[in-house]
Each structure stands twice: as structure tokens, then as C-alpha cells.
Image (cartoon, rainbow, N blue to C red):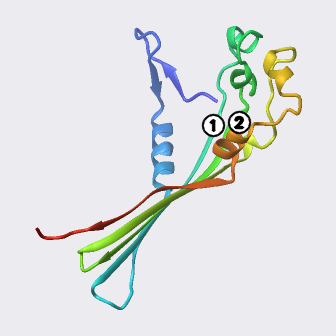
Amino acid sequence: MKFGKREQGAPGALRVAPVVVALLGLLGCIGSASAFNIESGNPDIVMSLDNIIRYNTAWRAKARDPGLANNIGVQDESDYLYDKNEMITNRLDWFGEFDFKYQNRIGFRVSAQAWYDTKYGSGSKAMPGSPVAAQNIKGTFNDETRRYYHGPSGEFVDEFAWINQKV
């Protein structure tokens, strides 16, 4: 699939077809974000909830760099893991914020995020014979990779309370 063509006289410059730009713009408008106020029945209390749901996917465009992937003296797993044209990420993300205010004098905010990427669920792959492959006999990702890249996982981003007091 070609997305554009090289312009004459500008080495390395890529002209993107207008149709591709229009499609990418349309996809950017499809994102799912919602923000709304929560009614409490008390005019002194203001609550709001904001959510963003995002889906990302990507493919490897070039072949492995032989200097990285075939060098058994370095950690090759990141470059060796995927082949050319193979999907490298298939990720769903959620980010949410909850705000609470009482008489605009006190309040708090809590935000959190969660994610899941199916491309990191199948296990790791290193060049056969490399130190990484020897250390990783089971062919599975370590706990940190499973937690932060594969998931499903999540975390609180921030939580704080505030007081607006006249001095």
C-alpha cells in the first residue's frame, strides 16, 4: 500500500495523497471522549466525569536491522520480536477524571487509566543463541512488560484535594 510519492527535486520528501490526509482526519474525529456533569440535586455540589477511550494499532514498516537483531552481544529482543509488515501494537486505552467541588471552596480530583494490548500476550522472541534467548527459556515476558505493555492493567494517575480559603 502506497500513501504518497516522492516529490521531484526534494530527496527524502514524501508528498501525502490528499485522500489519505482526509481519511486520517476523519479517523481523528471518531475518537471517543465524553465529559458530563453529574447532578446531585444540591446547587452547592458540582461533580464532573471525563472519559477518553482510545484504540491504537501499528505495523512494522521495515525489516529487522541486522546490526541490532543479529548481534548476540546485545539485547536483541526489541528489534527481533516482530517481522516486516507484522502488527506491533493492538492497544485499547481508557483515561478518566472525576472532579468534586463544594461551594467552590473545597474539592478533590481523581484520575486513572487502564490499558490492554493483545500483541504482547503471545510471548517474547529473541534471536536463537543470543544471551537474551538463553535467559528467557520459557519465552514469556517479564512481569514489568506484562504489567505496563500487555495488561490488562491500570493505575491511578493523580488524586488530590484542595481548599480555597480567604486569608
Q: Which sits in the foreground, 55 or 71?
A: 71
- Name the outermost residue toward the front: 167
Residue 102 placement, left or right of 131 = left
Tag of residue 20: none
Residue, x 40% and y 8% (percent of image)?
A: 9
Q: Of 16 and 95, which appears nearest the observer? A: 95
**Residue located beneath label 2 in the image:** 87
Left or right, 97 with reference to 125: left
Residue 58 tag number? 1
Across and down, in percent, residue 165 comes to: 18, 70
The location of residue 83, given as percent across then percent down, is: 75, 25
Mark 2 neighbour density, 10 Å: few (under 14) some (14–19) many (20 or more): some
User: Where 109 falls versus 12 (above or below)?
Assistant: below
How much space separates mark 2 and mark 1, taking CA atoms?
6 Å
Q: Is residue 138 visible?
A: yes
Q: Residue at left 46%, top 39%?
A: 21
Q: CB of mark 2 within 8 Å of CB of mark 1? A: yes
The quadrant in which the N terminus is found is top right
Q: Nearer the viewer, residue 76 or 4?
A: 76
> Left or right: 32 with respect to 122?
left
Which corner quadrant of the image does residue 15 belong to?
top left
Provide residue 78's location: percent of width, then percent of height.
Answer: 69, 25
Quadrant assignment for the C terminus: bottom left
